[in-house]
Image (tube, rainbow, N blue to C red):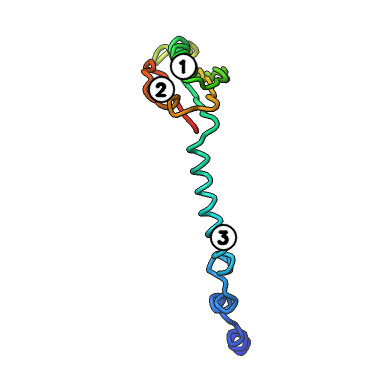
Amino acid sequence: KHKMASSCAGMVSTASLSARRGVAGNGVTARKAAARAPVRAAFSVRAEAASVAAAKIRIRLKSFEVNHMKAACDKIIEAATATEASISGPVPLPTKRRIYCVLRSPHVNKDSREHFETRTHHRLIDVHQPTAQTIDALMSLELPAGVEIEVKL
């Protein structure tokens, strides 16, 4: 009892210590936190300005059908070159194969199986130095069904 009483009497809570030193709850001093706030705000403004004047648009296409993919790539390239933007691509990315193994009969002939596969084809197109007309042309394109498009600025 005596040891606990003496050790508890000398203890000070960490909250009171941090309040004395001017430290916030997460270990950052108030001065440092105040100094970081304008830097974060300036960085977000710069990031927004960079996205408005994008130097490159990256378009990633996915499809199960190669013919639909080719048609979509041709339309994107035609729209971008009509507005005098430079293009790199379409770059063929690795095709993903997903194989499904299915039993031929539900009860007997366990060794007799069928294999089915889906192939997902990927293409990458970069549009360099896009203008407002380029973006409008790309947004108004009618692309074939079955082609998934990801656009990054």
- The amino acid at mark 2 is Ala
Q: In this rendering, which labeled residue sits more in front, label 2 or label 3?
A: 2
Instruction: Tell which of 87 and 70 is nearer to you.
Output: 87
- Based on the displayed image, in which of its 4 quarters is residue 12 positioned? bottom right
Q: In this rendering, which labeled residue sits more in front, label 1 or label 3?
A: 1
* Disc number for residue 82: 1
Q: Earlier in the sequence, mark 2 or mark 3?
A: 3
- The amino acid at mark 3 is Arg
Q: How far apart are marks 1 and 3 (CA)?
A: 45 Å
Q: Mark 3 points at which residue?
A: 36
- The amino acid at mark 1 is Ala
Q: Distance between the residues labelled 1 and 2?
A: 9 Å
Within 10 Å of the Cα at label 1, are there few (<14), some (14-19), or many (20+) other Cα atoms? few
Within 10 Å of the Cα at label 2, are there few (<14), some (14-19), or many (20+) other Cα atoms? some
Place of residue 118 in the rendered image (x, y in percent of width and height, measured from the top left): 47, 16
Query: Would you say residue 44 is visible in this rendering?
Result: yes
Place of residue 82 in the rendered image (x, y in percent of width and height, measured from the top left): 46, 16
Mark 1 lies on a secondary structure that is: helix
Q: Name the residue under label 2.
A: 137
Q: Are marks 1 and 2 in contact (CB under 8 Å)?
A: yes
The vertical placement of 36 against 54, above or below, is below
80 horizontally vs 143: left or right: right
Q: Which of marks 1 and 2 is nearer the N terminus?
A: 1
